[in-house]
Structure formats: structure tokens, C-alpha cells
Image (cartoon, grey):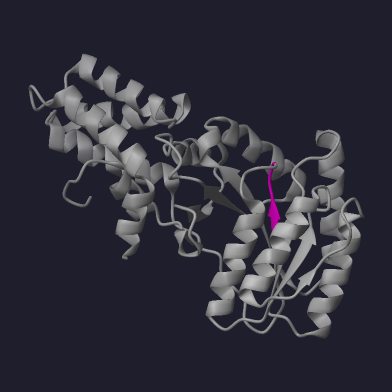
């Protein structure tokens, strides 16, 4: 299955919602008047694009109409696509630096899919021939350790784990030592998403970062925030918090197939400016894919000629 078809399948619920709404607004007349533009803005908000991002996109559409005078359905759709691409910015992928240890630190609140993402990344890199190690630094939940161990068994990947309730930083320390001893290419660290309070969580993540810097100063470290698309605008506030707490370098947006709220990708990009690196489009191992802005937008909107 091609990447475009994968995105279309994963975003089917959102795509159906947006396409039906867009066509309904202008279908009778084939063009947009001001009331219809207001309806289009509301449609974007209902798809969880967010008030700020939707307002910015609609400003672009209104400016383009004033400039060229074309209010046709096709012209509005093409400007909508261009505006969404501008919000998402240039794609940025998760690259593995050859010849040195790459550490992928996964952070985020509980339930977003961090452990599953760790397992899927492990499967991806093992398939391409990398030597991978998993670190179960989510010691808050025994189930997380068991789940990561299951992924290790499925992919033939060693897992460094301690007992539930132990110090996550100690797990990270041991995992780094094991990675160095085994000449590992990629170390994937799963972390807890909930402690006693936000400050406690921030302190724990900062402690983990210090261990990484001290024990693997030459490693290439990527901190990926995993957010759940079905949580809507909460994803925006989570991104802002974790960006301050853990020096996030990129985002993984999971469960885009879960409901018709896939527009939250645009809200997060507009509100935080953080690059989206990976998208979860389903439950299968192959459904964690590199995020591509153009493919995402073309999968979200009604079919048209590419912009």
C-alpha cells in the first residue's frame, strides 16, 4: 500500500467529515460567498483544526479572494491546501546518525501510545538491519514493562527493565551502559506519563536527560513527544508543557484513525511550531509512518489537482 493510500485510510473518518462538509457548503452554487466562508471556518474548527489555525487559514483564503477575485469551489480548495501546507511547514523526519549511538526518548501522558510506538519503532529499525535495544523506563506501570517486554520478544530485541516502582533514571543508566557494551545502534527509551504532579514529572524527565548527557555525551538524542489525536485540543496543551519539561525535538501523533478530529495536527503545528515526525494511522506495525505534510493535506481534503 502506497503512502498516500495509507494516509487516506488512516484519516478516513476525518476525510469523510471534511469532504462532506466542504461539498455541502458550496455544492448548490459552486462558489463561496462570505456566509459560506464562515461555514467553512466552522467546519475546520469542528474537525479540531483549532480556532487560531482555522482563523489563520481563512484569512489566507479571504486575502486570496480579494487579490484575484476567484470565489469558485476549486480556487478556495486550492488556497485551503496551500494554507494548510504553510501551517505544517517543511517535513522533518527521524533520522538515524550512522556510526554513533542514537537514543530515542519517548515522552507524553499515559494512554497516548508511547509503549506501542516504542515497539513499532523497534520493529521498523530491526527490519532495516539496525542493532536495537529497548529500555523500560516507565516503571510507574507494571503493564508498561510487560508490554515492552512483549514487543522485545516479538522482534527479538533485548529489553533492559527493573521492577515496577523502581527509579526510571536507574533503568536509563543501565540501558545506556548495555547499549555501549553491545555496540547498539539505537536505544529506544519508554518513559512514564504520570507521576504525582506536573513538577514531579518535569523533575523526573530532567533527571533522565542529565543521565543521558552524562553517560552518553556523544550520542545523537531525539526526544519524541507522543500525543493522541483523539484527545483534541488537549494535545496542544500537552505539547506546550512537554516542550518546556523535556526539550522535545519532534512529535508523534497517534490514533489518527480513531475519530474525525485529525485536524488537530494543524492545531498543534500552528500553536507550537513543533515538527511532526511520525503519524500513527492504525494498529498494525506498519501503520506508524513518517509524517508527510503534502500527503496529509491531500488525504484530509476532497480530491483536487495538486497545489
Residue 138 in percent (x, y) is at 79, 53
Q: Say which of 291 and 248 sits in front.
A: 291
Q: Say which of 65 and 290 sits in front.
A: 290
Q: Main secondary structure of the magenta part?
A: strand
Q: Residue at x 76, y 85 (%)?
A: 183
Q: Is residue 113 above or below residue 70?
A: below
Q: How many marks?
A: 0
Please give left or right for residue 162 compared with residue 281 in the image: right
Q: Residue at x 75, y 73 (%)?
A: 219
Q: Is residue 108 magenta?
A: yes
Please give left or right for residue 71 compared with residue 12 in the image: left
Q: Is residue 189 above or below residue 133?
A: above
Q: Is residue 210 above or below residue 255?
A: below
Residue 225 in percent (x, y) is at 64, 49
Residue 104: tell me if it is visible.
no
Q: Which residues are magenta?
A: 105-109
Residue 73: tell me if it is visible.
yes
Residue 162 in percent (x, y) is at 88, 62
Q: Say which of 53 and 25 sits in front.
A: 25
Q: Is residue 139 magenta?
A: no
Q: Residue at x 31, y 40 (%)?
A: 15
**Quadrant of the drawing holding the N terminus:** bottom left
Amino acid at each position: 500500500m502506497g503512502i498516500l493510500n495509507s494516509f487516506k485510510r488512516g484519516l478516513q473518518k476525518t476525510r469523510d467529515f471534511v469532504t462532506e462538509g466542504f461539498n455541502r457548503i458550496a455544492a448548490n452554487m459552486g462558489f463561496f460567498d462570505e456566509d459560506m466562508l464562515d461555514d467553512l471556518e466552522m467546519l475546520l474548527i469542528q474537525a479540531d483544526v483549532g480556532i487560531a489555525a482555522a482563523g489563520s487559514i481563512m484569512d489566507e483564503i479571504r486575502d486570496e479572494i480579494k487579490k484575484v477575485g476567484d470565489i469558485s469551489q476549486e480556487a478556495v480548495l486550492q488556497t485551503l491546501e496551500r494554507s494548510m501546507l504553510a501551517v505544517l511547514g517543511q517535513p522533518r523526519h527521524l533520522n538515524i546518525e550512522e556510526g554513533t549511538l542514537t537514543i530515542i526518548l519517548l515522552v507524553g501522558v499515559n494512554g497516548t501510545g508511547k509503549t506501542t510506538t516504542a515497539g513499532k519503532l523497534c520493529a521498523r529499525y530491526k527490519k532495516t538491519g539496525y542493532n536495537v535495544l529497548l529500555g523500560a523506563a516507565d516503571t510507574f506501570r507494571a503493564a508498561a514493562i510487560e508490554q515492552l517486554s512483549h514487543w522485545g520478544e516479538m522482534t527479538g530485541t533485548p529489553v533492559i527493565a527493573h521492577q515496577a516502582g523502581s527509579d526510571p533514571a536507574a533503568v536509563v543508566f543501565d540501558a545506556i551502559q548495555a547499549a555501549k557494551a553491545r555496540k547498539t545502534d539505537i536505544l529506544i527509551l519508554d518513559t512514564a506519563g504520570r507521576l504525582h504532579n506536573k513538577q514531579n514529572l518535569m523533575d523526573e524527565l530532567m533527571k533522565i536527560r542529565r543521565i543521558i548527557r552524562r553517560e552518553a555525551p556523544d550520542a545523537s538524542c531525539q526526544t519524541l513527544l507522543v500525543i493522541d489525536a483523539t484527545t483534541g485540543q488537549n494535545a496542544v496543551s500537552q505539547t506546550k508543557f512537554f516542550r518546556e519539561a523535556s526539550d522535545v525535538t519532534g512529535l508523534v501523533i497517534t490514533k489518527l484513525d480513531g475519530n474525525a478530529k485529525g485536524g488537530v495536527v494543524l492545531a498543534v503545528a500552528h500553536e507550537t511550531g513543533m515538527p511532526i515526525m511520525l503519524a500513527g494511522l492504525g494498529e498494525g506495525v506498519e501503520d506508524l509512518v513518517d509524517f508527510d505534510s503534502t500527503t496529509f493535506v491531500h488525504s484530509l481534503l476532497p480530491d483536487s489537482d495538486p497545489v
